[in-house]
Amino acid sequence: MRNFRELEVWQDARQLVKEAYQLSKLLPDSEKYGLVSQINRCAVSIPANIAEGCAKYSQKDFVRFLQISLGSTYELETHFILCADLQLVGSEESAQIIEKVQRLQKRISSLIKYNNS
């Protein structure tokens, strides 16, 4: 069993959750049950799936949870792109957080590749 607290990718995902929540607070009240809910749920899903995967004994199961986590990063990126498209947040704000999401995507992908070899 792995210690998820020691994984930098999990620590980065936790930080991303904070930033996603901060950005979602800027969205209009009309999005409370739409984009706000979706953003917050998929952001939380990223570190949660990394942690859950660490509890698995097999490498294959660990990788499967990393893949789920990676999928959530792509979902989160899409939500932020939509926020920018709909002009719900500024383009600079969305660009900054999208860059962080993409960085996390690369790190999770690298961890998947490392554990598949």
Image (cartoon, rainbow, N blue to C red):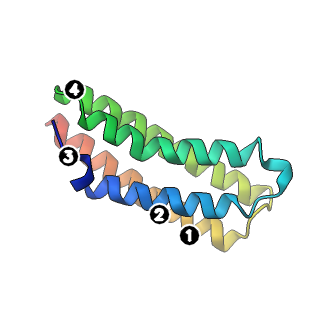
x and y, in percent, of residue 22 in the image: 62, 64
Q: CA distance from mark 1 to mark 3?
A: 29 Å
Q: Secondary structure at mark 3?
A: loop
Frontmost residue, 3 versus 7 = 3
Task: Tell me the kind of residue under disc 3.
Answer: Asn
Q: Secondary structure at mark 1?
A: helix
x and y, in percent, of residue 6 in the image: 22, 55
Residue of label 2: 100
* Mark 2 or mark 3: whose residue is earlier in sequence: 3
x and y, in percent, of residue 72 in the image: 49, 41
* Mark 4 or mark 3: whose residue is earlier in sequence: 3
Graded by Cα atoms within 10 Å as few (under 14), some (14 to 19) or many (20 or more), the crowding at tag 1 reads: few
Graded by Cα atoms within 10 Å as few (under 14), some (14 to 19) or many (20 or more), the crowding at tag 2 reads: some
Q: Are marks 2 and 3 in contact (CB under 8 Å)?
A: no
Quadrant where the N terminus sits is: top left
Q: Are marks 2 and 1 in contact (CB under 8 Å)?
A: yes
Quadrant where the C terminus sits is: top left
Residue of label 3: 3
Q: CA distance from mark 4 to mark 3?
A: 17 Å
Q: Secondary structure at mark 4?
A: helix
Name the residue at 75% across, 56% down. Answer: 85
